[in-house]
Image: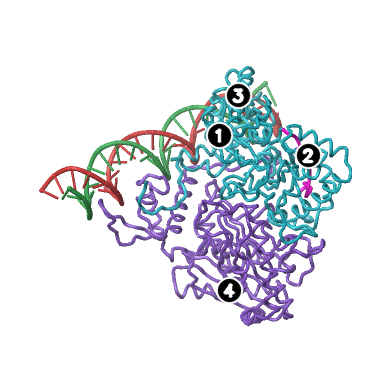
Chain colours: A purple, B cyan, C red, D green
DNA sequence: GCATTAAATCAATTGTCTTGACTTATTTCT
DNA sequence: AGAAATAAGTCAAGACAATTGATTTAATGC
């Protein structure tokens, strides 16, 4: 305990911090560009060829990069491109949803190697944790069966579940997982698995997935709207996920945004624009474990109820996109979700043409203003798994600073 | 011209980058904590006492820090605290508004030393630049009169004007300063003054001012709604101003946000909620240089037109705050502006109670969800002046990277 | 066959932080 | 009063990562 008044300051850095950053930008450059020669890396990063050579050497001996066959591309000595070693690192992703928990294990380049799910018992988190730890354990065994060396290459476990966290209940929705949100999940899973565990909401996880291997690949300013059971947004700002002051940034489902015809006492956006609301208008039972399949069927079958829900949701989302563009001025906006792919595509189609906004610029990057992202029940677990990879290997300010 | 396909990568760093970062965190720590001894700095930054000693030595010889009288605070050798030298650096802030341009000069700790304004001629930017350069020149002379050494300690000029920048005209508003926005202002002022010039919109500058010496002091996650001739927001995220992919983040005046009773083809928010719109309902002449005084008078006098405008604007702003809270999860939201203080206060009063949102948390920091900020015609120029200081001395990711 | 171009490496150098021993100045204990 | 303890700060040598400039290797172009 320190008696003196606490001093606020940012952390300094040293040679090691610089070196760590340089290793990370190499890995990042290879991830974004595929395969690059040492000379390419030197030009792209601004480092000297010698430095690049040393770092690549080191990364290769750590089993993170490997050389490809050399290519002749003109005069001069042919270049030897290097690429990431897919099995250079692994991470576990864990999604906790209302009725189900899913786990995936990915490698350094985002390939999904293991994919397991379990139903969650109705007894709440105390019972659920047992199921979850068992699921993770089975996934680890399956990984070790494929890659005997994988155990010591596991960089962490990413945990994703619906937010918001630490909030007084605003609306008494059956789909707010209050009991889970107040349970010390991170601690219990960390001690149960012996891994480093980080928690984020499902929209953030989906955004991480988009950045790793989806439409946001290589972009630094992206808004990912996540349409799942609820509605949220993952915000990638300056190349990093933004969490806000209390980790609840992006809870756009809570926005009281009006659509034409709404009265003054509008309900939150996700009461109109979420799988939960679609289930409501379809009269489906929210506690039914087969809910996802039922919704998918209903969307494919179509019909006036679904059509009118989609029209309403698309209108609200179109306005939401325009507002988010005005606020963030992003490179692109992505609509992704745990919702059926057919539903996402249908919504995107009806959201066009997008409304005028500051994103309407003559000299845009090739990215469209609005595009569809991953729409797969597994994308949240995948993004959760991508988080430890990103934490371990992506360039970020905090990685440069000295660690005590 | 490089023929090969472009490679995207982040910049690497080296010893110099690490060193630059360490110098910045020292200055930042002194700014936030007042005065600290070398030993305090070492503990707070995680650097070794020797390193801190070397850096302080260097900063002192650069005239940026100075020692105070040593203090005995218990056993051991008494500590020698160091503090920032107020006149260790200076920066110029320049605001360009419709009819007026204002300039201020601040020192390293944010004291305003010079404060001049001029009317802008109606002839547009070509003529205006002459007036502006003359104004800046007079301000520099006034500074040199106070501090003969100041000339070589000027770190830059911050320029603030209404946005958005680089956008195809979305709406043909008389108050969009299109001619100015398409004029190569930064280049002309840079060559005219010989200083490094950075451009930002007025809302961002106002947010910087709030952070330096307003309600956002010491906070890292703040949304500043700026009500001026137009409407914008300055976003402080993770302690830094966020500009988005193309420097137009925070253009909330462009949001097509509905209020009850609006039809589907709503106009942008700032058509209802800005000084310009108030002038419209008051039937004032936008080209009148005395517009600000007229609006102030009208607000103080009150009356049904003003009252109904305020009621409408407050309702829209209340909804906007709720949406921004849902999106950013900030520590606080500030309403500031170049609008009359009476108007800001009146709006805040009518915006209460704020709508339910994720900011409604039991364990909040002492900051209220919504508060009034600076409402002073000079706050934008002040914030503009703070920008070069921040760019030169604040710790930030980009300052670590190699410069080509 | 020789000049040119480009990739990659070698060996020496530079710059910054770290380490561990040391000095200085003050309070506390005996 | 004197010795021990504690803390601030310095000195000098060392460690580490990137840089520099010369060199090697391997291709194309004339």
- Asked if the magenta segment contains residue B372, the reply would be yes
Q: Are marks 1 and 4 in contact (CB under 8 Å)?
A: no
Query: Residue at position x 47%, y 73% from top?
Result: A144
Q: Is residue B10 left or right of residue B350?
A: left
Return the disc, 1 or 3, that comes first in the chain's sequence: 3
**Both labels 2 and 4 in a single chain:** no
For the question of whether residue B8 can be seen, the reply is yes
Query: Residue at position x 68%, y 61% from top?
Result: A319
Local SS, label 3 = helix
Which residue is denoted by mark 4 in the rendering? A341
**Separation of marks 1 and 4 at Cα, in angstroms:** 48 Å
State the mark number for residue B284.
Answer: 2
The chain that hosts pointer 1 is B
Q: Is residue A317 left or right of residue A385?
A: right
Which residue is denoted by mark 1 in the rendering? B197
A363 or B59, which is in the foreground? A363
Image coordinates for residue A11, horizontal then vertical, percent: 58, 43
**Both labels 1 and 3 in a single chain:** yes
Closest to the camera, between mark 2 and mark 4, is 2
**Separation of marks 2 and 4 at Cα, in angstroms:** 53 Å
- Asked if the magenta segment contains residue B145, the reply would be no
For the question of whether residue A152 can be seen, the reply is no
Which residue is denoted by mark 3 in the rendering? B134
Q: Are marks 2 and 1 in contact (CB under 8 Å)?
A: no
Closest to the camera, between mark 1 and mark 3, is 3
**Separation of marks 2 and 3 at Cα, in angstroms:** 30 Å
Image coordinates for residue B290, horizontal then vertical, percent: 76, 32
Query: Residue at position x 59%, y 17% from top?
Result: B148
- Residue span colored magenta: B365-377
Closest to the camera, between mark 2 and mark 3, is 2
């Amino acid at each position: 305990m320190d008696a003196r008044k606490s001093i606020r300051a940012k952390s300094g850095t040293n040679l090691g911090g610089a070196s760590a950053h340089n290793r990370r930008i190499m890995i990042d450059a290879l991830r974004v560009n595929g395969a690059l020669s040492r000379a390419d890396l030197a030009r792209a990063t601004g480092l000297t060829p010698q430095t690049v050579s040393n770092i690549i050497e080191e990364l290769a001996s750590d089993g993170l990069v490997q050389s490809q066959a050399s290519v002749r591309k003109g005069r001069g000595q042919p270049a030897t491109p290097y690429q990431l070693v897919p099995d250079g690192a692994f991470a576990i992703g864990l999604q906790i949803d209302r009725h189900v928990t899913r786990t995936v294990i990915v490698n350094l380049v985002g390939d999904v190697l293991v994919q397991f799910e379990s139903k969650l018992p109705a007894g709440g988190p105390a019972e659920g944790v047992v199921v979850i730890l068992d699921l993770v354990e089975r996934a680890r065994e399956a990984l070790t069966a494929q890659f005997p060396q994988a155990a010591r290459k596991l960089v962490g476990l990413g945990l994703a579940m619906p937010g918001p966290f630490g909030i007084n209940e605003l609306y008494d929705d059956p789909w707010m997982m209050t009991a889970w949100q107040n349970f010390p999940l991170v601690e219990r899973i960390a001690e149960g698995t012996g891994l480093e565990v980080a928690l984020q909401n499902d929209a953030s996880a989906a955004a991480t997935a988009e950045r790793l291997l989806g439409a946001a690949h290589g972009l630094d300013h992206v808004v990912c709207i996540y349409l799942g059971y609820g509605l949220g947004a993952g915000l990638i700002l300056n190349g990093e996920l933004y969490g806000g002051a209390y980790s609840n940034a992006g809870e756009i489902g809570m926005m009281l945004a009006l659509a034409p015809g709404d009265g003054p006492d509008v309900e939150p956006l996700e009461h109109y624009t979420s799988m939960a609301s679609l289930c409501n208008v379809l009269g489906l039972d929210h506690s039914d474990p087969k809910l996802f399949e039922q919704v998918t069927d209903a969307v494919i079958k179509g019909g006036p109820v679904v059509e009118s829900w989609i029209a309403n949701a698309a209108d609200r989302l179109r306005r939401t996109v325009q507002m988010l563009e005005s606020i963030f001025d992003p490179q692109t906006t992505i609509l992704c979700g745990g919702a059926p792919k057919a539903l996402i595509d249908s919504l995107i189609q009806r959201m066009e043409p997008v409304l005028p906004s500051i994103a309407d610029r003559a000299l845009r990057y090739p990215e469209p203003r609005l595009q569809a992202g991953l729409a797969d029940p597994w994308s949240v677990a995948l993004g959760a798994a991508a988080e430890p990879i990103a934490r371990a290997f992506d360039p970020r300010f905090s990685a440069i600073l000295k660690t005590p």
